[in-house]
Amino acid sequence: MKFAPKLISVLLMAQCAVTFAKGNADTIFYGGPIVTVNAKNEEVQALAVQGGKIVAVGTKADVTKEWQSGSTKVIDLQGQTLMPGFVEPHVHILVTSVFEGLGLNLSNFTLPYDTIQSLSQKMKVALKDVPPGGWLIGFGVDPSRTSPFMAELTASDLDKISKDVPIFVVNQSGHIAYVNHKAMELAGITDSSPNPPSGGIYVKDKQGRLTGKLVEPPSYLPFMAKMPNPTEAQLFGAIEATLKKIASTGVTTASEMSVGGNFGVDKEAAIYKAIFAKKASPIRVRGYLWGQALPAGYNNIKPNEGDDHLRFIGVKYISDGSTQGLTAALNAPYSYPKGSKWSGALDYQDAEIYKLAKPFFDQGWQISTHANGDKAIDQTLNNYSKLLAGNPNPGERRLRIEHFTVNTEDQVKKAVSLGVVPSFTIGHIDYWGSAFDQHIIGSERAKRIDPAGDFKRLGARFTLHSDTPVSNVGPLNYITEEVTRLWQLPPRKVLGPTQAVSVDDAIRAITIDAAYQVFADNIVGSLEVGKQADLVILEKNPRKISPDKIRNIKVKETWIDGKQVSQN
């Protein structure tokens, strides 16, 4: 039976009338701008919450008259701004917890850059806390942000820190690691060891000797197998601390992009289920299973399994490496070092990665593919075309490309035609923009990284993310980075001004469009009647101040389901 649009509207209104009892809101907010991020980007004066849902938005007079009772908690924003809770579409919660909560965090997003000497000194200090039989595990060294440029750790450098304690240090990109000889000994990796499958490399010098550098996560596995695992209490504690830290940035929904990448899919899914079962997460999580960890025919977890707080929705694959790490797969060689013929490498052949993804696509999983370089983007788009063949509405699958860093205009057009929603690591511009422009890929390719402007002009969605631990979670920072496109290193420069977008566009990329990307736009992402009351209170209105100052706005409170979960 078909209903006219007007009748459908009446039926929905009647349903809301049954669901929500007017005159008895749990909470009403007013006294500051309320940025709805609805289709008209309206700001309103008041918002009412009942039973965890938004039941009214509008003028203060109307909302209070219809919804306030003697038991309603009335919150005067006192000039502060209320917005939808931010949606972070690409994080690695467990990895961040292990590296930043249990290991040595060497990340440096400030100036001046580190040197090999300063990094070594930090590791020497941390060595004192390594228990007998333990490993020194670190994260965050970055040759592209080290002085001198591209200075890299070697096994010999790490041997100077310790020849007895195994050392394993992951590059900021996550796609490269460095080990000492003791770690190689324990892992059983020698000069004659073959490279592992799926893109892994044990790097050797011209004489065929191991340098201590590992490329791509498959090369990490022999080392991880020998590391002592954290206790359950340590791991759960670190994850819960990371979730609270994410909530403090105003994020109310985040996508864990590597369920199974460390301890196996079933074990990691069980960890998340346990955390949510005891209501220890202050945010919603959308989970993506780590494709490389899935055996053929895997169906222990079903597509869309879970509820509105924890739901498993996708499968993620890695097609290449890191642009700043010189391992992303490009169609033309890197500009560094001068005269280089190296253009990176794909982790899989075209048919190989298609064969892996097809069964899970057919099961109904959303497919997400990490593709930094234009060669990897070509491969991904071609395989997505095959997956979507014959689908009259390809956009309904909301296929994802993560990073979409080095790209062409034609690739953007093809992505839009397939309904692909890209997510940009916008810190590429801020922290690595000068390195891309001046050294790694040259100005012509660098000005196109993270092409939000192109997607916007074609009327398509895009999102912004941290890829934590690759960069820090901070949605307000993403807005500043996307709108200004200024790189950090002096003298500062705008990288690709035609790819900048407006503040409102950037806000949508961290709210409603990110919610759309993770199939949660029906419940979060905007402040509209019927949606969950996932909210963030900001010190200032990002729509009313200079874009370069938005990153400095303080997040005051984070609310989920109409309840405060974080206060700063």
Image (cartoon, rainbow, N blue to C red):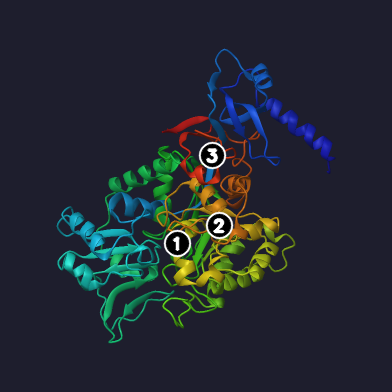
Q: Residue furthest top?
A: 70
Q: Which residue is mark 1?
A: 432
* Crowding near the residue tagged with mark 2, few <14, some 14–19, many ≥20 C-alpha atoms within 10 Å: many
Query: Which x, y percent locates residue 198?
Result: 44, 74
Q: Which quadrant of the structure image shows residue 157? A: bottom left
Q: Secondary structure at mark 1?
A: helix
Residue 253 seen from this side: no
Residue 229 seen from this side: yes
Q: Label 2 near label 3: C-beta < 8 Å?
A: no
Residues under labels 1 and 2: Cα distance? 17 Å
Q: Residue furthest bottom?
A: 207
* Crowding near the residue tagged with mark 1, few <14, some 14–19, many ≥20 C-alpha atoms within 10 Å: many
Q: Which residue is mark 2?
A: 423
Q: Which residue is mark 3?
A: 85
Which circle, 1 or 2, is nearer the viewer?
1
Q: What's the residue type where badge 1 is placed? A: Trp
Q: Who comes first in sequence, dot 1 or dot 2? A: 2
Q: What's the residue type where badge 3 is placed? A: Gly
Q: Residue furthest front?
A: 491
Query: Which x, y percent locates residue 56?
Result: 65, 27
Q: What's the residue type where badge 2 is placed? A: Ser
Q: Label 3 near label 1: C-beta < 8 Å?
A: no
Q: Relative to 76, is 520 above or below?
A: below
Question: Nearest the camera: 312 or 6?
Answer: 6
Q: Who comes first in sequence, dot 1 or dot 3? A: 3
